[in-house]
Image: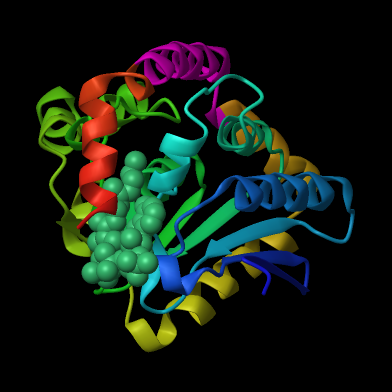
Amino acid sequence: MNTIQIQDEQGVRIIRFNRPDKRNALDLNMYKQLTEYLIQGEADNTIRAFLIQGQSDCFTSGNDISDFIKHGNIGPNHPAVRFLFCLLELKKPVVAAVAGSAVGIGTTLLLHCDLVYADHSARFQLPFVNLALVPEAAASMLLPQLVGYQKAAELLLLGEPFDAKTAAELKLVNQVVESADLFEYAFSKAKRLADQPPEALQATRQLMRPNKSRVQHQMHQELEEFGNRLQSPEAKAKFAEFLSR
Ligand code: COA
């Protein structure tokens, strides 16, 4: 079974998380495939936009927690880190369609997407501190910028789940749509992006992201702290607690 599936349709590369038995928890191999499919898509002139989605009942439960134990060393070459930097570097636009749980990186990756659609079942959560970790994907900078410090503190320090309506109010999600329409609607928006003049679209995206080097810097800072936290007794105890539920 391919835990990451792709389908190229009308200029859109649809990338689907497909590990339903583990709620689409992302393991190292999945990150590697994601990065490879993004890099391939960037190089392919027939692909003009990406669409990232999970199943109708789960986007992704985030990083595979057992990998935090098995592969406790994290650095710039870690597959998850390479995936996040690759996402940041993309020239082509990215749309996400979220149904069900979007936990950890399932929420932080959305900060790097251009358009995000969710249905009413979507549940977002940033439980980094809950797991004795720190955020990644520059969420510690991008989220306060997006929603203000106090709201970001609520999301990142308390780490409680929030629903699609809240995510839309926070501007993390463009629009909440009916479950039956979600994937088709998100695809139609990705297709519209794919039909736009690509050079102007890509140039506009670049102009809209003037602080990319600041984002990269924050990601490196987070990475260093994340690596320290992974080795901490409090984090190891939290991982063991989750896995022995
Ligand atoms: N890493 C590893 N395994 C995970 C996982 C994760 N992030 N999320 C879920 N799983 C596994 C569970 O261990 C369980 O495996 P098992 O059937 O072999 O016991 C299976 O997926 C189903 O999970 P379950 O918790 O029973 O599903 P649920 O529908 O009740 O809840 C979630 C879904 C996403 C709310 C819940 O699984 C969860 O909170 N997961 C952890 C999220 C997390 O902390 N991610 C890391 C962020 S940095």
Left or right? Give the position of 232 relative to 138.
left
- Residue at image position (36%, 47%) is 107
Q: Residue 134: percent from the left, percent from the top?
A: 30, 25
Q: Quadrant of ligand 1?
A: bottom left
Q: Residue at x 29, y 52 (%)?
A: 243
Number of dots carrying numbers: 0
Residue 57: horizontal and vertical position, in percent?
36, 77
Residue at 24% x, 53% y is: 244
Q: Is residue 86 visible in this depiction of the protein? A: yes
- Residue at 18%, 62% (x, y): give it: 165
Q: Is residue 24 magenta?
A: no
Q: Nearer the viewer, residue 199 or 230?
A: 230
- Taking 90 as reference, is 103 left or right? left
Q: Is residue 99 above or below residue 91?
A: below
Asked if residue 237 lies left or right of residue 32, the reply is left
Residue 95 location (% of width, % of height): 54, 57
Q: Name the one closer to the observer, 36 or 198.
A: 36
Q: Which residues are magenta?
A: 208-228
Q: Main secondary structure of the magenta part?
A: helix
